[in-house]
Image (tube, grey):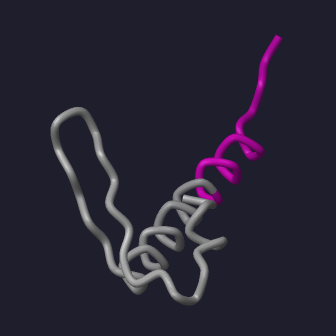
């Protein structure tokens, strides 16, 4: 979703296609999705950095 940060101000919605399915998102929804997935990535990175590795 990093591409949502680069949306021009004139963009009012985005349509994503997955196979035959289409999903449309308005600007606010795109921003919310970006925040959601960034939070997931941050949690995953924090969990990986706190993991204990044993030889």
| Of residues 40 and 26, the one drawn nearer to the viewer in this rendering | 26
| x, y percent for residue 19 | 24, 33
| Of residues 42 and 18, the one drawn nearer to the viewer in this rendering | 18
| x, y percent for residue 8 | 60, 80
Residue that extends furthest to the front in the rendered view of this protein = 10
* Count of number-bearing discs: 0
Q: Is residue 47 magenta?
A: yes
Answer with left or right where residue 15 lies relative to residue 1. Answer: left
Q: Measured along the vertical axis of the image, is residue 25 above or below residue 21?
A: below
Residue that extends furthest to the left in the rendered view of this protein = 20
Q: Measured along the vertical axis of the image, is residue 15 above or below residue 48?
A: below
Q: Residue at x 52, y 69 (%)?
A: 34
Q: Residue at x 54, y 59 (%)?
A: 1
Q: Measured along the vertical axis of the image, is residue 51 above or below residue 28?
A: above
Residue that extends furthest to the right in the rendered view of this protein = 55
Q: Is residue 51 magenta?
A: yes
Q: Residue at x 52, y 58 (%)?
A: 40
| Of residues 37 and 53, the one drawn nearer to the viewer in this rendering | 37
Answer with left or right where residue 25 lies relative to residue 28. Answer: left
| x, y percent for residue 2 | 63, 60
Q: Quadrant of the C terminus?
A: top right
Answer with left or right where residue 10 lies relative to residue 28. Answer: right
Residue 7, by quadrant, is bottom right
Q: Which residues are magenta?
A: 42-55
Residue 23, by quadrant, is bottom left
Q: Residue at x 17, y 44 (%)?
A: 21
| x, y percent for residue 28 | 40, 86
């Amino acid at each position: 979703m990093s591409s949502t940060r680069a949306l021009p101000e004139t963009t009012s919605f985005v349509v994503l296609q997955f196979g035959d399915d289409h999903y449309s998102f308005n600007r606010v929804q795109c921003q919310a999705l970006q925040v959601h997935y960034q939070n997931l990535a941050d949690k995953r990175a924090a969990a990986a950095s706190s993991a204990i590795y044993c030889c």
